[in-house]
Image: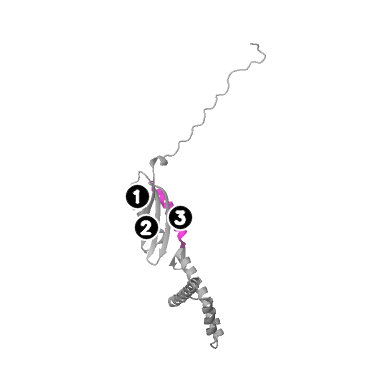
């Protein structure tokens, strides 16, 4: 299967290379329309040329469909992590893992914001984390804690032994002033109710 995929990829690459070279030649008059016409006339002199051209076209159509299926299948596999249980295969969306990593960051008070990108490959899981830290955070200690927590919790929930690499990029350091939450405004004191008596018809 892999050899067939490599062969189809090679054929498609060759075809696109030839088409690109022809377009380049046409643009600089290296290969003119007259040359193309003469070449086609030469080709049509051979017997069964229609069968050959038709077979080539059919092969290219099948190869294109096959290549598209390979690419779509590979893309789908890259978006999930799959493992086998006794009762069947289980897949976990990488988006779900990214959301889980974001929620883990709420336990670290030095982090203002965290975003992650999870990549699953044959060599294991790679998690790229971009964080915004408060200015009072110790960057080496905080980033080490982030890596340790993410790696430990992901291994626990997935139950896998594949290597997990956590890369942390500090994209922003936020001043302490922005960390303070504005105090709630106290409500205005209510005007005490009128407790006196009103006398009607009394002249001043």
Say which residue appears at 42% left-offset and 41% top-offset. 178
From the top left corner, tell me how far across and down residue 22 is, in percent: 49, 74
Query: Can I make out residue 152 in this image?
Result: no
Say which residue appears at 52% left-offset and 80% top-offset. 56
Name the residue carrying label 3: 99
- The numbered mark at residue 18 is none
Judging from the image, what secondary structure is the residue with disc 2 in? strand
Q: Is 78 above or below relative to 57?
A: above
Asked whether residue 124 is drawn in magenta, I would say no
Q: Which residues are magenta?
A: 92-109
How many residues crowd mark 3 within 10 Å: few (<14), some (14–19), many (20+)? few
Looking at the picture, the colour scheme in use is one colour
Judging from the image, what secondary structure is the residue with disc 1 in? helix
Name the residue carrying label 2: 166
* Mark 3 or mark 1: whose residue is earlier in sequence: 3
From the top left corner, tell me how far across and down residue 27 is, in percent: 50, 70
Which quarter of the image is occupied by the C terminus?
Answer: top right
Q: Are marks 3 and 2 in contact (CB under 8 Å)?
A: no
The residue positioned farthest toward the left in the image shown: 140
Asked whether residue 102 is drawn in magenta, I would say yes
Name the residue carrying label 1: 142
């Amino acid at each position: 299967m892999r050899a067939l995929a490599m062969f189809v990829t090679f054929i498609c690459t060759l075809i696109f290379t030839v088409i690109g070279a022809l377009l380049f030649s046409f643009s600089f008059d290296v290969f003119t329309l007259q040359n193309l016409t003469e070449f086609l006339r030469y080709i049509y002199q051979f017997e069964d040329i229609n069968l050959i051209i038709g077979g080539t076209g059919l092969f290219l159509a099948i190869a294109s469909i096959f290549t598209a299926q390979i690419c779509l299948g590979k893309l789908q596999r890259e978006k999930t992590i799959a493992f086998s249980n006794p009762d069947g295969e289980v897949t976990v969306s990488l988006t779900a893992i990214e959301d889980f990593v974001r929620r883990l960051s709420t336990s670290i008070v030095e982090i203002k914001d965290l975003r992650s990108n999870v990549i699953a490959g044959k060599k294991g899981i790679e998690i790229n984390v971009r964080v915004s830290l408060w200015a009072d955070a110790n960057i080496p200690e905080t980033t080490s804690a982030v890596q340790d927590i993410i790696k430990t919790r992901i291994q626990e929930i997935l139950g896998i032994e594949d290597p997990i690499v956590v890369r942390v990029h500090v994209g922003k350091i936020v001043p302490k002033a922005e960390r303070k939450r504005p105090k709630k405004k106290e409500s205005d004191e209510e005007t005490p109710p009128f407790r006196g008596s009103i006398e009607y018809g009394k002249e001043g």
